[in-house]
Image (spheres, grey):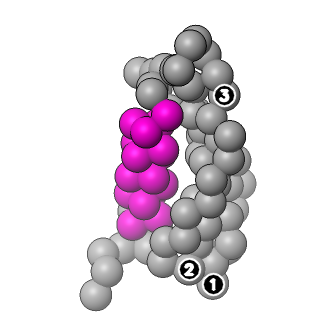
Amino acid sequence: MHRVIAYRSFEIHVELTPAAEDMFDVTFQIKGGANLGVLGARGGCIPLRNGPFTERWAYLVAEIAGQAAIDVLLGPIE
């Protein structure tokens, strides 16, 4: 399953892979945005640890992790 979340001119691509019944491993990837050069070679898929997660938690954790990564790269929202 795949979901794209827009955040600060970037896209957070979240991919869920079934791990067990109703449980998923999750990866996310940051793409796009006006500051694409900031990502460089770091724009690959990042697996989240401490899974598997339920579908709802997988999307939530990946969204928060992606937003935090973008905030670290760009600095705080002013």
Pick the residue in front: 11 or 3.
Answer: 3
Residue 53: horizontal and vertical position, in percent? 45, 26
Query: Label 2, on which residue?
Result: 9
Main secondary structure along the magenta-highlighted residues = helix
- Residue 39 belongs to magenta span: no
Q: Which residues are magenta?
A: 55-71
Q: Residue at x 49, y 71 (%)?
A: 7
Q: From mark 1 to mark 3, how far is it between C-alphas?
A: 30 Å
Q: Is residue 44 above or below residue 47?
A: below
Contact, mark 1 vs mark 2 (Cβ under 8 Å): yes
Q: Is residue 76 left or right of residue 67?
A: left
* Direction front: furthest residue: 22
Is there any visible trace of residue 35 in the rendered image? no
Amino acid type, mark 3: Thr
SS state under label 1:
loop
* Mark 1 neighbour class, 10 Å CA radius: few under 14, some 14 to 19, many 20 or more: few
Q: Quadrant of the N terminus?
A: top right
Which of discs 2 and 3 lies nearer the camera? The answer is 3
| Residue 5 on image: x %, y % | 55, 63
Q: Pick whichever of labels 2 and 3 is earlier in the sequence.
A: 2
Disc 1 target residue: 34
- Taking the spot 48% from the left edge, 44% from the top edge, the residue there is 59
Image side of residue 76 versus residue 48, left or right: left
Q: Position of residue 78 (x, y in %)?
A: 28, 87
Give percent across and percent down for residue 57: 40, 36
Q: Which residue is mark 3?
A: 17
The foreground one among 73 and 54 is 54
Q: Tell us which disc is closer to us: 1 or 2.
A: 2
Give neighbour class at mark 3: few <14, some 14-19, many 20+ (Cα, 10 Å): some
Bin the neighbour count of mark 2 within 10 Å (Cα to Cα): few under 14, some 14-19, many 20 and up: few
Question: Compared to 22, does 37 lie above or below?
Answer: below
How many numbered circles are shown?
3
